[in-house]
Image (cartoon, grey):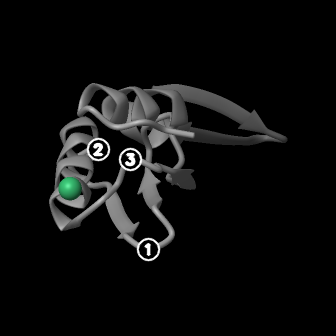
Amino acid sequence: MIACFFGSKFVNLELSKSDLFVTMTMQLKVPSIACEGCAEIITEAIESLDAAAQVKVNLEAKIVTIDSKSSLESIKEAITEAGHTVE
Ligand SMILES: [Cu+2]
């Protein structure tokens, strides 16, 4: 719990851990994507980090769009661990 004073007003803010991270939209180029199966593997890898993540894969452009509270670095790591290459 965080207590703040704004002028004479006493405000209590309760923050859960996940609220401390803002959902970000990230785009990653993953040239190793070849088919729908690759897209599924990558989507599952990201969802294992953040079950609430929204993942869209553009198979032709090989671009993965992610809405997630996870950091870009951890997402890149998850994709790499799933056997793919992030540009
Ligand atoms: Cu594939």
Please give the name of the residue rendered at 46% of the width and 62% of the height, measured from the top-left corner.
62
Q: Earlier in the sequence, mark 2 or mark 1?
A: 2
Depth check: give the residue in front, 23 or 28.
Answer: 28
Q: Which residue was labeled with disc 2? A: 46
Estimate how packed mark 2 is, as few (under 14), some (14 to 19) or many (20 or more) residues with alpha carbons within 10 Å.
many
Q: In what element is the residue under mark 2?
A: helix
Residue 56 in sight in this render = yes
Q: CA distance from mark 3 to mark 2?
A: 16 Å
Which quarter of the frame holds ligand 1? bottom left
Provide the residue designation for mark 3.
32
Q: Where residue 58 appears, x then y in whole percent?
A: 41, 71
Name the element at disc 3. loop
Residue that numbered label 1 is attached to: 60
Q: Quadrant of residue 77?
A: top left
Secondary element under disc 1, as helix, strand or loop, is loop
Q: Foreground mark, 3 or 2?
A: 3
Give the quadrant of the C terminus.
top right
Label 2 C-beta lies within 8 Å of the nearest ligand 1 atom: no
Q: Residue at x 43, y 36 (%)?
A: 85
The residue positioned 54% from the left and 26% from the top of the image is: 2
- Mark 2–mark 1 distance (CA, rounded to whole Å): 20 Å
Vertical position of residue 69 compared to residue 62: above or below: above
Amino acid carrying label 3: it is: Ser
> Of marks 3 and 2, which one's residue comes earlier in the chain?
3
Percent x, y for residue 1?
A: 45, 26
Near-viewer residue (23 or 57) = 57
